[in-house]
Structures are given as C-alpha cells and as structure tokens.
Amino acid sequence: MTGSTAKNLNIKIGGCPDAVSVCRFPSGQNASIEAAFTPRSSFQKATVKLAASVGVIDIDFPMKFPEACSHWGLKCPGKAGLPQTLRGEVSVESSYPKIKIEVTLQLFDDKGETLICKSFPAEIK
C-alpha cells in the first residue's frame, strides 16, 4: 500500500478526539470523516476507499458513493498546490461485529495515483 502523496494532510474522524488512541464507532450510526490536504499533482476526478483490517484480513467498507468530487465535497478538477477538503459519512451497520479494527482511508485520482493513504485504530461499539 502506497503512502499519501498529498502535503499538509490533516484528518479528523468523528468519535476520535485527538487525545484518544482508538476511534470509537457506535454501531448503527454514521462515522464522519474529514481530510484536509494539498495535492502535489492535478487531477480530474478522485475515488474514496475505506477498508478495515482484522488481523491479516482486509475488508472493504461498502460505499454507495465513492466518487469524491460529487459526493465527498472535493472541488474537481483539482489543481496541484491548492488545498482541498474531503468530507463525508460512512454507515457503521449494526450487523458489523463489535471488534477492534485498523481502518484505512484512501483517495485515488483518475490516474490511479494515491493522494491519501492513512490508517488509524478503531473499535466498533
């Protein structure tokens, strides 16, 4: 997995204050995600991907709307050096097991390049 190519990456996750080591996602609710960044290269469109790792198993979060420009608030086309903010919510289904996971947020441009790749510990409660 390639790391972020964006500069000035600042991610805020609802239910995850800065002082907390594990983000808590309440079952049956939405988790909010905000990622401010400055792309190093221009892009026409972008796609969001969220995955959870449990041990050695990676599971993609099902996403109804992965298109970052039309559903996550990115301004497209994006220009290199101009700040952007990705904002959205992900449903934490009540059917998900109540476990600790490692969540990975990724944002890919239209050329398949990784703009954002950031992982953080979380727990579905």
Image: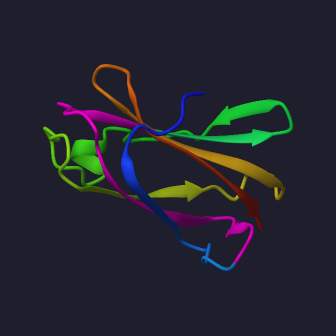
Residue occupying image coordinates x 54% and y 71%: 14
Membership of 116 in magenta stretch: no
Membership of 42 in magenta stretch: yes
- Relative image position of residue 36 (x, y in whole percent): 35, 59
Which color scheme did the rendering employ for the protein? rainbow
Quadrant that contains the N terminus:
top right
Left or right of 81 in this view: 31: right
Above or below for 16 versus 119: below
- Relative image position of residue 41 (x, y in whole percent): 24, 33
Residue occupying image coordinates x 73% and y 48%: 102
Residue 93 position by quadrant: bottom right
Magenta span: 20-48
- Relative image position of residue 80 (x, y in whole percent): 19, 40
Left or right of 40 in this view: 90: right
- 76 or 92: nearer the eye? 76
Above or below for 101 versus 19: above
